[in-house]
Amino acid sequence: MKMISKAYWNIFVFLALGIPTWTQFTLGLSLVSKDIESRNIKNSVYTHQNVKSVSYKNDIENHRNFLSLEPQKLSREWVTENIFTHIEVLHTVNSTSPCYFIDKSLEFMICENSAKIEPDHIPAMLTYLHVRNVELSSLEELSLRNKSINVLLVTNTKITNITRSDLTGLADIKYLHLGGNLIQAKNSIFQSFFANFQDLTNLTHLDLSKNSISLTDVDEYQKNEDLLHNLESISFAGNPIRTLERNIFFTIRNSRLKRLDFSDCELTHIDPYTFQHLDFLEELELKENGGLFKLDPNHSPLSSALYYLPSNTFSYLGLARSELLITPTASLFVAKNSLRKLDFSSNLFFGTFLKYSILPYLRCLEELILSKNYISDIKENAFQHLGRLEVLNMSHNSLLTVPQAVQIPNIKTLDLSFQCAWYAQPYCLSNYIQLNLDSFRGMDNLENLHIKGISVLTPDMLSGAGQIVLLDISSHYLTSIQENSFKNMTKLRSLTCSQCWLLNPVPLAAWMDLKDITYLDFSYSPMSVIPAGRVGPRSGGYEGILENIKIKALSPAMLEDIKSLEYINLMTHPTDLIICDVQVVNFYKWSLERGNLTYIEGWKGGKGYTCDDISNNRVKSFEEFALNYVEPKQPVDHTLEGILAGVCLSRYTGWSMFI
């Protein structure tokens, strides 16, 4: 048989694994894949052999390593290797159980889409438990008492109330996520709001987002309690909290609370003394709370609350999507001695930024985010007094040129991506920002430049940016990188052009200027090729991130180029297979010669990389193919060379390569 369709191949695998029915399999696979996908695979962290910690960017942003052990990177290889493990253990608890494990060590469990969870469905020892879309009216129905769980997520249920008895016997919990339920907060003369969590003595992160909590009249009086000393982060995002009252945080005054999130809470008032007991607060997220600034942006309730904040480490203020027309000067002034990062993205600073307002002297400010604000210019010398400003994000605005106010020597990272996007067209006279020799004049310390969204990269655009170390030109619209575009960029070490779907092959002359590149990312850019021959002498090799390119092959020129590599990642999706040929054999031999000198992501001695052996109608690992390779009697005349050269039909993907 010359061709095996994906459907028949999948059916064969499913039957071999002993899956009872197609319905059960597709249900299980969809549940697993959704759970993995929903936590953003590239930014998630697992350790699948000794599972001790887990961190998900969407759930625990800015709270990495919260289980005190350093996590390992979740690679595409791990997902590929373990996908069938997920299927095999889908019903390891009970054939009728709505709970299943998602890891080999059986410490990560999901329970979902069920009317009821029986006590025997959940084992006594777990690192991670996620209960979702279950008909629960209280946490006590899960019978979790005295079970060892570090991370507990209960989402999208009908729970309306949390009591102390619900959480008794769960002292091991460090991260508690109760988002997306119907929880309300009730006033009590006997205990405070946080008294319900007092038995969680190891709790560090509490997420109560997207519930029905109002906090109005909840803690009218100070309760003589001293709770949750290890608590570091609280999220009330997405709750109908219109007012923050004085005593809400009094009972956790001795905690080490560092982060508060009140995103999208409809806030209109904050008591001046709300934060007076938070000695360690570092981050305050208030995005999508425009009601705080409607009466007077310069003298909002926030300014008084920040004035009485005792923390000397307060460093981040998030005011994105706050319907601001001018900067809230008074609020910024009271935090001027400690604020390091300020987020003003997605507001309404039309036209010239700071034309009708000012930024006070923020002596410690290091990062300023002004993206998505319809800004077409910036008042001259607006940032001159921000002596420590190093990161400036001006992406998704209406800039036609680089404003003079931006050209200050202390800026190290500048993002000018996607200027004059479709939503800003009424404020633009052209489709793209115009860059030239004078665009980066005076920016002597500029190292990282992001200009995503351009259509053509010409030599003039970066002629004045010879000091750039990192360049990101990723763009759906980029069609051409012209010769000499990198001519004067002698310090360039990192180049990213991800998802450049329309990019034509890059001229050899352009590659020849990248003499000391150490990081290269052309993922999802199927038409961009590295031509035959060497890119140039290297001081430390380059990190080849060329994954997910469907048209791919290895060549003698590439093998010559990568001789001095310290790290390389040429992994592809399991269905995007290249043709097994002599270059696969050469690559395998090269890996043996390099030994431990080069780390090949996902290599596993050749078992982790696969190719399509057309002659035998089989998918083989590089190791298997190389060890059994027989030289052809009549060598094929290969006239094209390069990492990406000829094209031939693969029976799985329809695309592959030959050299």
Image (cartoon, rainbow, N blue to C red):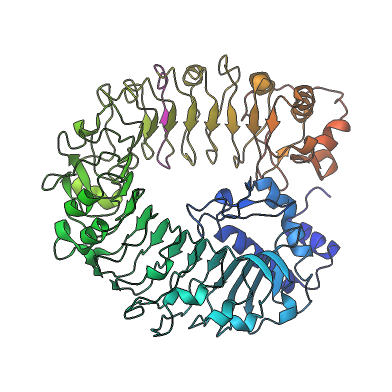
Is 464 drawn above or below residue 367 in the view shown?
Answer: above
Image quarter in which the C terminus is found: top right
The picture places residue 69, in percent across and down from the top left corner, at 63, 49
Q: Which residues are magenta?
A: 475-488
**Taking the image as drawn, is residue 531 in sight?**
yes
Between 77 and 583, the residue placed more toward the observer is 77
Residue at 43 percent across and 42 percent down: it is 476
Is 403 drawn above or below residue 274 in the view shown?
Answer: above
Look at the magenta stretch and give its main secondary structure. Answer: loop
Side of 228 relative to 283 (left or right): right
Residue at 48 percent across and 69 percent down: it is 227
**Taking the image as drawn, is residue 653 in sight?**
no
**In which quadrant of the rendered view does residue 432 lie?**
top left
The picture places residue 222, in percent across and down from the top left corner, at 35, 75
Between 153 and 555, the residue placed more toward the observer is 153
**In which quadrant of the rendered view does residue 656 lie?**
top right
The picture places residue 305, in percent across and down from the top left corner, at 25, 61
